Amino acid sequence: MKRRGRLPILVAARRLNRLSRLPIRFRLTGVFVLAMAVLLAGFGVIIHMGLRSALDESVNSSLQTRADLLIPLVEETDPHLLPMGGSGLAEEGESLAQVLDRNGRVLDATPQTGGLPLLTPAESAQASQGTLLVQHDAVPGLEGRYRFLATPVHSGENELVVVVGSSLDTRDEALSLLLIGLLIGCPAALVLASFLAYLLASSALRPVEAMRREAEAISAAEPGRRLPVPPTGDEVARLGATLNAMLARLENAFTRERDFVSDASHELRTPLTLLKAELDLALSRPRPPAELENALRSAAVESDRLSQLAEDLLLLARADEGRLSVPGVPLEVRDILISVRERFARRASEAGRLLKVAAPAGLKICADRTRLEQALSNLLENALRHGQGPIQLATIFDDEHLELHVLDRGSGFREDFLPRAFERFSRSDSSRAGGGTGLGLAIVRIIAEAHGGSAYAANREGGGADVWLSLPRRRP
């Protein structure tokens, strides 16, 4: 039983699946045709019913008027003196009239009836009790359908029934003509509307098809190619504009990825080449221990550089994939700055540079200590490598935000380099550019954005650079 019950559902599902595979223009046309068919059918039924009701009302009104004219005549005449066809009942045309006694016997009638009663005995008995309206599809001696109005009349002491009738041929003919017109006109209107609906759907979807063909032809080998957008300003035009904006973003992302791979390959090639050269040189001939130790130390430096570059690339990849984890915990800002300063104290002392921390005690921020120290270390590394004079780790804060600044003296940044200072593998040609991979500031910006903040760079008045992180003090 369950199996039989599932069969109609499966059949309906298959049919719906087949319908869903039809082109959209056919589905839109089909829906429009169905709705138009229901609308035309309803319109036709309403028109037909309205006309039939109006014609019936006209026939009934005519019968009532005829009865109202005959009743006074019958009331004033002795029923025993009513001659068959000899009274005022006689009338040419399709109207019928009869006067019946209480037993249903015909006392007077129009000639067309041939003296036969127009009502059945049951109808006569019912009419003697009150006005009766009946319809006969067949009348003896007459053709066509008729409608009769029977009204009781008192003529002296006699109870009579006045019956008037009217042919329904004209009414039926009018309804038949209307029905034929509806049966011909509605399908014709439906076909015309369906054709127009198909043209409209095809016209509306033509820009979509043009965009589809263009999208099929677009490839990475043709940068800058875009979808055609119709000048209509409608939903299709907005869709095309949105898709073109998406293509621009994808193109930019592809360009960045390509440049990233190219730059990463270049950065990896340099230390690998130096590392291989040092090892080849050490193995080229027997060397004293001191020379071997120097070669190994140089190889270790290049290995550290490779390791750091790999870590930086991994961090960038995680950030691109949205997997850079920065859990927020309350941290003492001064402790973080002092920790970073201690990490670079020896290098600064060797370079004759002074490291200063300017942060109040008790200032806190909700952040990831490891990532925050990594970002500050990158800024301090750049200041030691490219700047001059003392280096200051300073803070600017309010109730909602905290800025961590690394300031130095020297030549600062080139003005044309500042807008792209935080781009990956971006290096200036000034004195601040030598020796790095171009990823330090990019990682600073990524860490700042992961904390809900941002990173900035500017030149100081009197020379030097100011690079800082702007972070919210409380993580949402």
Image: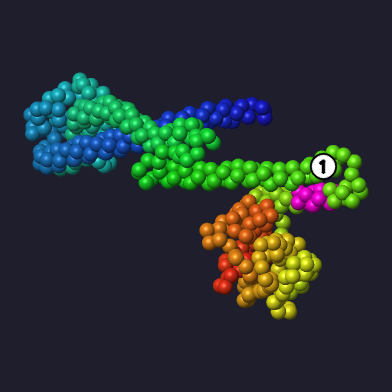
**Residue 17 located left or right of residue 301:** left
Name the one closer to the observer, 37 or 136. Answer: 37
Give coordinates of residue 237: x percent, y percent.
Answer: 40, 43
- Residue at figure coordinates x 57%, y 30% from the top left: 13
Give coordinates of residue 197: x percent, y percent.
Answer: 35, 33
- Amino acid carrying label 1: it is Leu
Question: From the image, which quarter does the C terminus lie in?
Answer: bottom right
Q: Is 238 placed above or below 208 here? A: below
**Residue 354 located left or right of residue 452:** right
Residue 214 image-quadrant placement:
top left
The residues colored magenta run 296-306
Residue at far bottom of view: 361
Is residue 297 in the magenta section? Answer: yes
Q: Is 11 placed above or below 156 here? A: above
Residue 94 image-quadrant placement:
top left
Residue 253 seen in the figure: yes
- Residue at figure coordinates x 63%, y 57% from the top left: 433
Give coordinates of residue 307: x percent, y percent.
Answer: 77, 50
Residue at far right of view: 289
Would you name the residue on which mark 1 appears?
Answer: 281
**Residue 4 located left or right of residue 123:** right
- Residue at figure coordinates x 23%, y 27% from the top left: 177
Name the one closer to the observer, 302 or 183. Answer: 302
